[in-house]
């Protein structure tokens, strides 16, 4: 029987943690959410030397305070689930900052082994780190690794196994703070042990004392539930106040300074300066791409070429796929008709199969290449630089540079873009970003704009629509920023050095993201298709057309039947264009029977009116029903309002 | 908030010793004296390595009140203008290296 082992990976962002995770688990991994949280949880399994090992990749974080959901999730997992071993991935090229986190793991009395990663990068910086000395100082095993090439992974696993065997005993370093801080901690620890012993079964008592001194809101919340909790909190408050009086800084800053000075001492002791650093290509590239003038045309060129590549490539593949699939469906239909009544065949074919085709023809040709290119930009380190350059602009709508990343995602597909808003720090920032991100025309909406306005009215009109959309995003973002309560958060972001991305890592990332997309979007698209097809077959659509005539025809100035494609568009937006053509063909007309104004109004409404069903589902998953529906109804109202206004204004402008 | 920004842009000449990060020139170095702002911001800065007494180098400033890039503890950090304006340093005059 294989023995069971549970390990977790913990470390800062950009240290190659996920690369190590991929090296360990390969394709045996699942990505989901932590229960009840919108924090990504990656899990996987591997077999090694008769061990059945379950690996959890904790989110990349800088600290174990209660700054973000990711930090709380991580420390609770370590303290409560108590994994057998924690692999702390440490970036050798930024040792001091990484050790700051390691020290906090030690405070949590977690059983750690260290993967000293990116030793190659450190060498380029002219730094050579002695793993032996580091192990000696921290009293935990240290294995040097270069995750990208897989160097040291086997040794790391051997170390993990040796520690769990008990062949090696872990007696990690006990951190001692400065004199008065240390005695304050000890005083408070005594009170904690005495008054709330139950909580000390979960978290180390010393750690509770430290967190209380730091005024950690999450720990305070937990303590309030105990009978003598208030008393403990009062004591902690007094002690923290005393510390602050001595140091003239918030206690959390005092503690951070203490940890950093210890981290520096360790880093300095274990660092042997190797060759002198040379100006590398990475530095030169970084210099040029964040240049205050040159940076912007480069940014524009990078993203423009990315989108051209996706659309040109995607269109070709999408058209081919659609053709093949429609042949297959026609075959299936001819078989089904033999065994099922006509209406049921319609329901299965138009509802189920068309829904599936809709999913496949958009997911594969557009989403997959988009994810690959995004992975390249992410892993190379370009995205933080783009965020840096765009910080100023994003501040105009109350967000900061990082929001540029989901915004860019939005041009591909709103679903990953909504999920991408997780990189923002606060709930407010996340919601605000999601609100503007769904207004960005995704690949499907681009198909409508280019296929209708671009083709029949002219490219300049299509571009004007895009420009209008951007202006709208800014205006609405600004309004939402003023209306939503709370303070805007400024940009504090690490800019990791450029790296050559690992192809393997990008493929794995693309695979798990595509899987995630398929799980959210496909059931919704297929179920939605079935429902709408059932409504159409029952003759319900006639009522819908009648009921919506005053709005569609009276207010928007569109032919009444366009309500059908607009409703179907909820499933998948470019379906609206195909259906529009179908509806017109049935009446012996074609797309060109629409006037230029009608085309523009239709595209404008389709662009804004509703994030598709899959997006609504993604929003619901991230923010709950209330906010998802709020976004949906605001967008519908806005689309109708602007569509009607555009109809009237364009009539005035274009007839005179 | 706006007031604070304005204040930090024109530091009181009497306490010329300490200047905000945004008043440093590219390539300038200094030691951090303090950061002011909400508890969350100050703690976050400290956790990212910007603790009192640490050496900071201003690497890059963006145009039009854009973000700045600093180097601290061997790591490059991007700070928004509003954040950088709240971080005060004592400039290092000696051993200028351009």
Image (spheres, coloured by chain):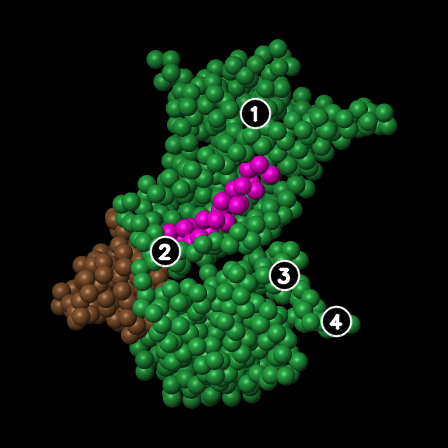
In the rendered structure, which disc, 3 or 2, sits on the residue that comes first in sequence? 3
Using the numbered discs, state the Cα–Cα distance from disc 4 to disc 3 in whole angstroms. 17 Å
Residue A2 badge = 4
Q: Which residue is mark 1?
A: A577
Label 3 resides on the chain identified as A
Q: Are marks 4 and 2 in contact (CB under 8 Å)?
A: no
Does residue A188 show up?
no
Using the numbered discs, state the Cα–Cα distance from disc 3 to disc 2 in whole angstroms. 30 Å
Residue A379: in magenta span: yes
Residue A25 badge = 3
Label 2 resides on the chain identified as A
At x 46%, y 57%, the residue is: A426
In the rendered structure, which disc, 4 or 2, sits on the residue that comes first in sequence? 4
Few, some or many residues within 10 Å of mark 3 (<14, 14–19, 20+): some
Q: Is residue B78 above or below residue A123?
A: above
From which residue to which does the magenta span run?
Answer: A364-385
Q: Using the image as rendered, state which of residue B43 and residue A637 is in the foreground.
A: B43
Q: Is residue A160 above or below residue B64?
A: below
């Amino acid at each position: 029987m294989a023995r069971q082992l549970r390990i977790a990976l913990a470390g800062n962002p950009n240290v190659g943690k996920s690369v190590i995770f991929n090296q360990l688990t390969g394709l045996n991994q699942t990505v989901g959410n932590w229960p009840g949280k919108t924090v990504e949880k990656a899990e996987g399994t591997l077999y090694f030397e008769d061990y059945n090992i379950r690996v959890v990749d904790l989110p990349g974080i800088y600290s174990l305070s209660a700054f973000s959901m990711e930090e709380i999730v991580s420390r609770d997992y370590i303290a409560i689930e108590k994994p057998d071993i924690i692999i702390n991935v440490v970036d050798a090229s930024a040792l001091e900052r990484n050790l700051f986190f390691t020290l906090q793991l030690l405070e949590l009395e977690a059983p750690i082994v260290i993967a000293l990663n990116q030793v190659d990068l450190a060498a380029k910086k002219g730094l050579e780190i002695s793993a032996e000395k580091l192990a000696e100082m921290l009293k935990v095993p240290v294995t040097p690794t270069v995750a990208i090439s897989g160097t040291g992974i086997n040794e790391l696993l051997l170390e993990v196994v040796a520690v769990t065997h008990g062949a090696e005993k872990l007696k990690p370093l006990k951190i001692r703070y400065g004199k008065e801080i240390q005695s304050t901690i000890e005083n408070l620890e005594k009170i904690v042990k005495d008054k709330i012993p139950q909580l000390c079964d979960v978290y180390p008592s010393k750690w509770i004392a430290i967190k209380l001194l730091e005024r950690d809101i999450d720990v305070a919340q937990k303590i309030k539930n105990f009978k003598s909790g208030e008393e403990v909190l009062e004591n902690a408050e007094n002690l923290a106040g005393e510390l602050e009086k001595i140091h003239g800084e918030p206690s959390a800053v005092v503690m951070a300074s203490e940890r950093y000075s210890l981290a520096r001492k360790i880093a300095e002791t274990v660092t042997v300066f190797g060759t002198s650093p040379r100006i590398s290509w990475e530095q030169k590239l970084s210099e040029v791409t964040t240049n205050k003038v040159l940076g912007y045309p480069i940014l524009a060129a990078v993203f423009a070429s990315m989108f051209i590549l996706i659309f040109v490539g995607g269109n070709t593949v999408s058209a081919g796929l659609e053709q093949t699939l429609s042949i297959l469906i026609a075959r299936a239909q001819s078989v089904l008709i033999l065994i099922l009544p006509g209406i049921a065949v319609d329901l299965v074919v138009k509802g189920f199969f068309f829904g599936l085709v809709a999913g496949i023809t958009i997911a594969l040709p557009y989403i997959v290449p988009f994810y690959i290119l995004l992975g390249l930009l992410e892993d190379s380190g370009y995205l933080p630089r783009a965020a840096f350059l765009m910080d100023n602009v994003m501040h105009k709508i109350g967000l900061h540079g990082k929001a540029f990343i989901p915004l860019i995602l939005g041009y591909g597909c709103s679903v990953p873009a909504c999920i991408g808003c997780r990189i923002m720090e606060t709930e407010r920032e996340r919601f605000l970003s999601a609100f503007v991100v769904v207004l960005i025309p995704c690949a499907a909406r681009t198909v409508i704009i280019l296929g209708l306005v671009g083709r029949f009215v002219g490219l300049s009109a299509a571009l004007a629509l895009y420009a209008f959309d951007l202006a709208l995003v800014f205006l609405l973002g600004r309004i939402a920023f003023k209306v939503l309560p709370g303070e805007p958060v400024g940009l504090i972001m690490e800019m990791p050095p450029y790296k050559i991305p690992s192809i393997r890592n990008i493929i794995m990332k693309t695979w798990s993201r595509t899987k995630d997309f398929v799980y959210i979007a496909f059931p919704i698209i297929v179920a939605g298709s079935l429902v709408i097809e059932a409504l159409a077959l029952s003759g319900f659509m006639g009522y819908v057309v009648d009921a919506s005539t005053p709005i569609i025809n009276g207010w928007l100035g569109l032919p009444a039947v366009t309500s059908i494609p607009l409703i179907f568009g909820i499933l998948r937006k470019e379906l609206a264009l195909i259906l529009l053509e179908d509806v017109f063909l049935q009446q012996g007309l074609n797309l060109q029977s629409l006037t230029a104004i009608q085309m523009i109004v239709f595209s404008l409404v389709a662009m804004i009116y509703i994030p598709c069903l899959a997006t609504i589902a993604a929003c619901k998953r991230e923010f709950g029903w209330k906010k998802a529906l709020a976004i949906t109804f605001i967008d519908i109202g806005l689309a109708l309002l602007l569509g009607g206004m555009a109809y009237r204004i364009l009539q005035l402008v274009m007839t005179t | 908030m706006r007031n604070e920004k304005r204040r930090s842009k024109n530091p009181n000449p009497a306490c010329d010793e300490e200047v905000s990060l945004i008043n440093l020139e590219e390539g300038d170095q200094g030691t951090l004296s303090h950061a002011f702002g909400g508890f969350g911001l100050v703690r976050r800065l400290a956790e990212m390595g910007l603790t009192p007494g640490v050496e900071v180098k201003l690497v890059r400033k963006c145009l039009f009140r854009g973000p700045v890039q600093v180097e601290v503890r061997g790591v490059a950090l991007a700070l928004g203008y509003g954040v950088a304006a709240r971080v005060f340093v004592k400039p290092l005059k000696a051993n200028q290296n351009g």
